[in-house]
Amino acid sequence: MNRLLIYNIGHLVTMDAGRTLLRDAWISCRDGFIQEIGTGKAPELPDTERLDAHGGIALPGLINTHHHMYQNLARAYTPIANEGLLTWLAGHNHLWKNLTPEHLRVAAQVAMAELMLTGCTTTTDHHYVFPRGTTHLLDAEYEAAQLMGIRFHGCRGSMDVASEITPEILVQTTDEILKDSQRLYEKWHDPRKGSLSRLALAPCSLFSVTADLLQESARQAREWGLRLHTHCAETREEDALVLQLFGSRPLDYLRRLDWEGDHVWFAHGIHFNDAEVAVLNKYRMGVAHCPCSNMRLGSGICRVNDLRRGGSPVSIGVDGSASNDSGHMLNEVRQTLLLTRVLHGAGALTVEQALEMATLDGARNLGRTEDIGSLEAGKCADVAIFPATTLFSSGAENKIHSLLLCHAREVDHLVVHGKVRVTAGQLVGIDLPRLLEKHAALARNLHESA
Ligand SMILES: [Zn+2]
């Protein structure tokens, strides 16, 4: 039995139905789940590990709903420093022909370290690069997640159409992709409450896959009860390309191929028109908003409030590390707040609403409202504890608001499924300097062999 008591929490943001905020709180956890939440003097519990939150701010663990972790092997890559999406993609895709499971395992560990140290307890990764001849690539990421102790939803990406953007060597056959999806589903998808390992199906983008693959992925997802994910409406160029290739706008094309329903969430979703927003609202289809990447690539601004007002979940994603080029989860929430205000005005999104997107909307997009996204008895014990004050927030009147209004900070402690994974700002059991050394060597190796 695994018992943990987190005590001395200065501010606790529960994200429960009443959006309860507590002062001087404690949380008791048992076997990965929250048993009880209280305020005042913490109980003395037998055989229980105790974690002192030192008056910090506790949030439900943040949920990252879009990423490409392998891209941290090409951060700040000069040839694509100033390019928009399609040229940016073509400008680094050639680097990946020698990507091995070892590259991906280490890249994923680094990406997970960044996420965990910045408050994330559940992450996806949309991995779509499978160089010819490689097998078991996504498995390396599941193994990395087990090593790091983060809750992981692998998104089996895929490309079965080569083009000027996608080199032939990165393309698999439709059949190979569907068979590997089945293998991954059987090996890694755990649908139970509290699961640490799930699978989603995620063809890369409309212009890099066949209609057959989109339709078959939708069929597999329905049959196996999986979520469906892809990039959609990221840039105007992409909309025009899809219109030229298939004679429809992206969402219409996808709907014809059975991509309709509340199990679908799209990355970016910037250029949906009013009619498309209404369709997304009707079916409760979701969007993963990735503000840093959207600004970095000059893609546009997601209509966060229009989508959310009509009932679509809009969660947050750091996106790949060659277009962010960091995976600081709390900073992504801060950027969401700021960028949404650029589009809709200063009163458009409150700190509480931005945090809601990073927790509750994330849980909705991943199909996990029953067990993650809020701190309540019976839910997973996934807790991010940030220091109440830092140099960059000293003097703040509202400590909770300072999390997003001031410069983004790192966690003091992180608990995933009742286990302490970060304490005193350090990852437990992970030699970070050694990991970074290995990562830098693998990045060099990949660039030199490209
Ligand atoms: Zn992406």
Image: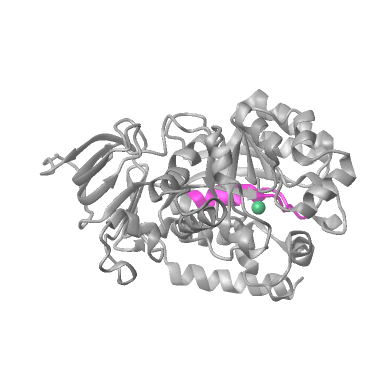
**Residue shown at 32%/43% (left/top)?**
418
* Left or right for 233, reference 120: right
Q: Is residue 144 within the magenta segment?
A: yes
Residue 155 or residue 283, whichever sits in front:
283
Farthest residue, direction top: 223
* Left or right for 280, reference 310: right
Numbered marks: total: 0
- Range of residues picked out in magenta: 127-145
- Position of the C terminus by quadrant: bottom right
Q: Quadrant of residue 223?
A: top right
**Residue shown at 80%/40% (left/top)?**
249
Q: Residue 117 placed where, x, y %? A: 41, 60
- Position of the N terminus by quadrant: top left
368 is higher (above) or lower (below) than 325? above
Q: Residue 226 placed where, x, y %? A: 61, 31
Q: Is residue 428 visible?
A: no
Q: Is residue 333 visible?
A: yes
Residue 108 or residue 374, whichever sits in front:
374
Q: Residue 292 placed where, x, y %? A: 57, 60
Way the structure is coloured = one colour
**Residue shown at 75%/46% (left/top)?**
205
Residue 92 or residue 10, whichever sits in front:
10
Q: Quadrant of residue 80?
A: bottom right
Q: Is residue 410 within the magenta segment?
A: no
Q: Residue 362 placed where, x, y %? A: 50, 41
